[in-house]
Image (cartoon, coloured by chain):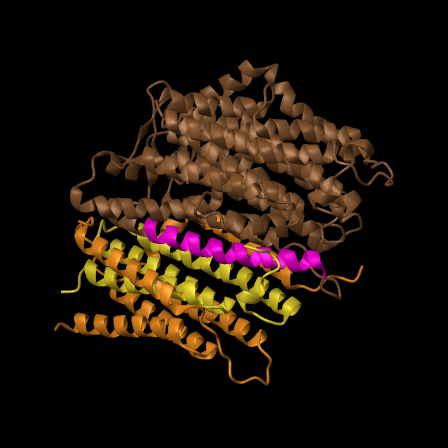
Amino acid sequence: MTPEAVIFYAFAAITVGSAAVVVLARSLIYSAFALLFTFFGVAGLYVLLGADFLAATQLLIYVGGILVLLLFGVMLTHKIYELDLRSEVTQFLPGAIIGSGILVLLLVTAFRTQWRIGPGRPPQATTQEIGQQFLGPYLLPFEAASVLLLVALMGAAMIVRRRREA
Amino acid sequence: MNEVLQSMRLFRPELALTAALLLVVVVDSARPRGRDLINRLLTVAGLAGAAGLCLPLRGVSASLFSGMVVIDPLAIYFKVLLIGSSLLVVLIFTFRNSAELQGQGQGEFYALMLAVTLANVLMATANDLAMLYLALEMVSITSYVMVAYVKADRLPSEAARLSNEASLKYILFGAVSTGAMLYGLSLLYGLAGTTSLPLIRDYLAAGVSDANRLAVVLVTLLVLAGFGFKTAAVPFHFWCPDVYQGAPTPVTAFLSVAPKAAGFAIMLRFFFQGMAAGTGWELSGTLDWPQMLMLVSVATMTVGNVAALTQTNMKRLLAYSSIAHAGFIMMGLVALSANGARALMIYLLAYVFMNLGAFLVVTLVHAHEGSFDLRDYPGLYRRAPGLTVAMAIFLFSLMGIPPLVGFMGKLYVFAAVIEKGYFWFALAGALNAALAAYYYARVLKTMIIDAGNEEKPPLRLALPDAVWVAVLAAANVLPLLGWRWVESWAQASLSMIASR
Amino acid sequence: MIGIHHYLVVSAALFSLGVLGVLTRRNAVNVLMGIELMLNSANVNLVAFSRYGAGNLQGQLFAVFVIVIAAAEVAVALAIVLTLYRLRRTPNLDEADILKG
């Protein structure tokens, strides 16, 4: 096996394995930490795919932002002295059936379809080009995303803030 | 750079909305005295300005910002519709006449309204998968926040609980639906090799090989999950009644109208091959579209109408009624013709006026009576005759009784469907319309004929409220006088830009 | 040789696990985690197609925006969950039952 294959299988195993733990674990904290490993695994896959900027973004935002937020969410919605953070599972079987069905469907689709396999893009540094795209063709989504973040920030703060005394 | 500057010249409505949004945020943070009034004026000015700035752009066809958004007659129609709906909602529902919103902070509401309008407009004009997804999520996220708007005092109130629960259901359901849609979009990118909609349409129009058929079907289903969620079509409608009931009624009124219209706009763009007006509309892809859409449309209409039959909560009743109307609007989509698209657009326009009117009446009754329950509605005819007459107009319009705009909307969709030969489909639609008439009539009967509440004093409406009720009632009737103008506007808007 | 299909299998697994999480979990934060798995799976698709497919950066750029949107969504979702907890002392979805249906 080539080194690339070894690394791929390692990261794929980390990603999918951790994802399974996220979904199946009893304790909420286990799920959260497994999610951390999932995000790391995905970042590793991005590096393998030559998306270096994206991998860094994934780590910064997903791990450093979203995961921290989720951990805060876990912590703030349980009594502090209650160490056993259980999360209950409702009716596992129907969900499992649907989940497996979806998995089969996706796998069949993935292997049957003739995807647009082209010359591809051998791994190379992407940061400069992404930067140029953001200020060029992707300018509008870039600016729109900034408005979205402003509004989400304002909205989330508004929802959580206690009402001002009249 | 040049292209950006050129695009900005045609982007003025959106720029006006953004400028207004930023100003409102700044004013709200600075906390001057009277900022609520300033914010309200800013919002109204921003929305009116944006709508006005759309008018010089009629007839323009261009692709902006490297193909991210487009301007074409279809886009202008929807932009005016969307901005106009937002403007109406802001003008009609004030913080005074809505009991749920009273006492809540106002600045954020106006900022959110401007933001969601901007996002709706971007969604209706998006021409690239990334832009489409971004705009759709922007609409969704601002909607989630708006639904969660009612907050608790020191003690949790019923309204706060409802608002919170509604927003939770909304965001979880929405995030799952759009997550599924995103997976579909990623597969579409893999198939077509590009995220640009015109190029994707070309790719699909060139024919789909047998090996890829499964993937295209899967993509369609996943994408429909997202669009179905936005327009509350079956089976993605489950969030609708709870969210409509829990959200503050002005927000509900807005949600029932604007994001739904934007959702239909993007469905038109996504599923149709762009053609210049006059050469007909073709569908991209090679699937059995009519059958699938017909199924969804009938299911949506029926579920909505049947569920509404037993509702006593006015907000839930109107929620199910909205779901049913989405089914009717979809009939225009099923027809897969220029007439069908035109019917869809006309129905949406009528729908804005009828639905906002109905919600306004419900809000006012709640503000004065404190109840959304139909069982508290008897005797309203004696206590507020004008309001009841207006409600009658709105309900008759929703039923589709001539000569109101609701009837015109139904007329066009039925005509488009029959023209294509889908007689059973039309019959199903007609049966549904009859079914709907039952529960609309029941509301009216309760208000006019049922006895009760005799000892209560007459309901006095504040002057602005009475004026708006009258204006909306007129809006349901007057377009008939200038109908040729309305129809020609819709017809002229049937041109969609085809290339990147 | 690692090709597109390898990555598609990974993303299919992630997506299915995410759906499983969404369908079977009671705690709202857990459902959010399931949603994040779904979004990540779509991102893996986008980046993989960018690398092996047409060879343009559009997939990667799309993925950046997905990450941004996911962050905004999680922020708002957690704000709502926090409010739910304040009002009701539980983050469990089963307890959110005033609205029937």
Q: Quadrant of the C terminus of chain A?
A: bottom right
Left or right side of B472 for B224: left
Residue pictured at 65% horizontal, 30% vertical? B394
Main secondary structure found in the magenta portion: helix
Does the stretch in magenta take in B172?
yes
Residue B303 x %, y %: 48, 42
Q: Chain C, which colour?
A: yellow
Left or right side of C42 for A164: right
Q: Chain B, which colour?
A: brown
Looking at this view, is A144 or B391 the one in front?
A: B391
Q: Is residue B60 above or below residue B481?
A: below
Q: Is residue B120 above or below residue A81?
A: above
Residue C19 x %, y %: 38, 61
Looking at this view, is B58 or B30 the one in front?
A: B58
Residue pictured at 27% horizontal, 37% vertical? B287
- Residue B329 in sight here: yes
Residue B273, quarter of picture: top left
Residue A25 x %, y %: 40, 77
Does the stretch in magenta take in B115?
no
Q: Chain A, which colour?
A: orange
Q: Quadrant of the N terminus of chain A?
A: bottom left
Looking at this view, is B380 or C20 the one in front?
A: B380
Residue pictured at 57% horizontal, 52% vertical? B242
Residue A44 x %, y %: 30, 70
* Residue bounds of the magenta highlight: B157-184
